[in-house]
Amino acid sequence: MARTPTQSTARSRSAAASGGGRGTFVERAAGWSIRHRALAIGGWLALVLVALLASAVFSGPGARTDDPGESGEVKRVLSAQENYEPVLENVLVQRRDGDAGGARGGFLDDPALVKATEDLVAELAGVPGAVTGLRTPLDPGAEEQVSQDGRSGLVTFFVSGPNEERGAHFDAVVGAVERVAERHGGVRVVQAGDVSLSRAVDDAVKADLARAESTSLPITLGILLVVFGALVAAAIPLLLAATTVVGTFSLIAVLERWVAVNSAVTSMILLIGIAVGVDYSLIYLRRAREERSAGHGVAASLRIASRTSGQVIVVSGVTVIVCLCGLLFSGLDVFRGLTLGTALVVGLSMVASVTVLPAVLAALGHRVDRGRLPWLGKRRTTVAESRHWARLARAVVDRPKVWGGAAVVALLVMAAPALDLRLQDAAVVNSLPRSAPTVDAAIRMQEAFPGAPTPARVAVWDVDGAGPGRAGSPAVAAAVDGLRQEVGRSGGQLAEPVSTVRVDEVLVVRVPLAGSGTDEVSGAALERLREVALPATLGEVEGIDYAVGGRTAFAEDFREQLTSRAALVVGFVLVLAFVLLLVVFRSLAAALVSIVLNLLSLGAAYGVLTWVFQDGVGSSLLGFTPYGGVAGWLPLFMFVVLFGLSTDYHVFVLSRIRERRLAGATTRDAVVGGIAGSAGVVTSAAVIMTAVFSVFVTLSAVENKMMGVGMAVAVLIDATLVRGVLLPAAVAVCGERFWVLPGRLDGLDRRLDRWSGAGGGARAGSVAPATAADASPGSSGSAGRA
């Protein structure tokens, strides 16, 4: 026979009245921090300081990622060599006014273009040992170095080693190109290649990160001032989130020696760290302040906040971390660092919110309200339910099927564009704005010489590893010549110029591909190279092996593996989330409803993402150029992160509803009161998260814009349509069945009660209702407040 909330709560209240039970684990941890506040605060600061010192002492070369597919094989073969692969750089030489041309010979007939090219060759020769393999339009038989229309010429070269001198050689080459460009004002002399494009991306990432830091923190502080109406209370969540992010950055700097962490992870840590850290602190601090305003003392208010909001924070944090671990099932190394960094910042935020924060609030006492702002201070510390949300919730529970059905239809309409979602990583020329000089150079180079900025890299090596013999044999050289002929027969899919370079025992053949580098045209060209051109040439040589790498190959291999493993990741997240929610609420209906609502809001967010970035709606307003797809890694990352964050709202609101239900209210009144009482915290947290995510929409990289829009839209949907309509409608439709656990799970229920240490009260969404020991004059109904 199933147990009802009333039956299971009677046992917990009896235990509380007799003084039995020590409270939940979170309550005990918070109690220790309150009693040893100096040790708790000092320990946290010491942890951050030690992490900072460790990052300085143990900094060094980071671990390398193992790329998927053939591109990963190329990376492993080249990494096994003693020397690094020489980097290929290209310099485009063309008239700024575009007057030259007409045929390939037009370039050589233009004195200005010829003189600029000769000057560039002389400048590069003036830097001894800096370049090798120099090819120019002026070389005999170098027709492939001139564009089809004769308007542009391409100077290609490798920046030479040894390894430790490559950086200095590259800087010398950049200086030479800049000097030539200054002397020939009527000729465009611009550079784009392996290192120059990578530096453009790195510079953009650093600038974006600095801009996000300088923008998100002041915005968050401003919102917190409005929420709390007092400077001290507003500063606490921000300082706690800031120290959490600093500690995470420092720990990651140490751990990346064993786990590869790319530049994108720093943006994720900042984005998630500020949003989650402030969100968790806000939930706890708001509850503690409202309990004090209702008449409780500082100790009692912190005890209630730990038992209620603290438990919600732990459930939310654990759910986010567990969901993030699903990324590991993708088998992609790049997600390991992403999972580690994001899980670490969420975990630290969770621990700080239920240990350090209670200690800080206990130390401050009533001084937490100092620095009140005029007009806001008194109003923000007054306990009040939201009349607007109460009115909406009352209308929904009166006609739940009508309101719920309309909300579901609205979300399905928003999700409809996602049916045409195309996973496609942005090439550098698509990712960054054209205002970046290197990006503009790459775009112009791509137009004149398709595929030249980011060619495919074919690595050729001996099967038995016997040395450079067969890989450097006349048969391989003849096969490479045959590959050049295949380029001419490819119908423009494979392009010129084809270049070769030796890296110890490996021969690297670079073949430009048509298209932008990651679009469908480039994908078709890569397929032709792998399936037709290479088998017909290098594939006929015995004793060698080869694989195709490069930006296009990596994007295709990454997408293929991600697609093949996506079902495993999604299944893991759904199963684990269901189990966690079942343990928290001891209700099948609550667990199933939360998962379905999460999927609906995620689908709507995917639809908006597709509509904006793939279809280009609003691109001019957001400052990007659509390239026909959405970054391949983003939907799965959004799924695991937002599934956890969405659970935060569901657990929090359902806990408030459950508290009122356990206090004796009807399901209808509990829903209305829970929605109205939690409105302040949920709205404030959603505004902060949306503001932080929206900061990334202002950054330069289109991937950051995608992430900002997708996550901000999902949070807004959760905080409005899901929280205000779908959740109360689902509870109202289920009625008393929403709170019932099947009798065959009753044994599990009792074991979880004993493990929690709080008796059946933990069944209130891991939130025990306030007992008589917590009561004080004016505190009636406080259990249902946020």
Image: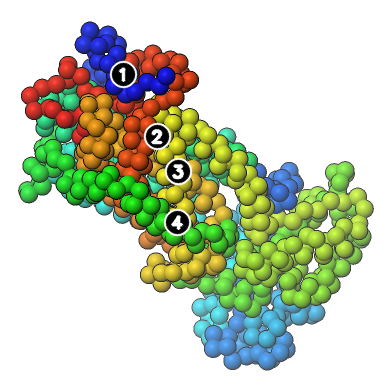
Spatial distance from mark 3 to mark 1, Cα to Cα?
A: 28 Å
Question: Residue 365 vs residue 558: left or right?
Answer: left
Are the residues flagged by discs 3 and 1 in contact, CB closer than 8 Å?
no
Q: Which residue is mark 1?
A: 7
The quadrant in which residue 330 appears is top right
Spatial distance from mark 2 to mark 4, Cα to Cα?
A: 21 Å
In the rendered structure, which disc, 4 or 3, sits on the residue that comes first in sequence?
Answer: 4
Are the residues flagged by discs 2 and 1 in contact, CB closer than 8 Å?
no
Q: Which mark is residue 596?
A: 3
Question: As shown in the figure, which amino acid type bears the numbered disc 3?
Answer: Val
In the rendered structure, which disc, 2 or 4, sits on the residue that comes first in sequence?
Answer: 4
Under circle 1, the secondary element is helix
Question: Residue 122 vs residue 222: left or right?
Answer: right
Is residue 367 at all visible to an observer of this figure? no
Q: Which residue is mark 4?
A: 412
In the rendered structure, which disc, 3 or 1, sits on the residue that comes first in sequence?
Answer: 1
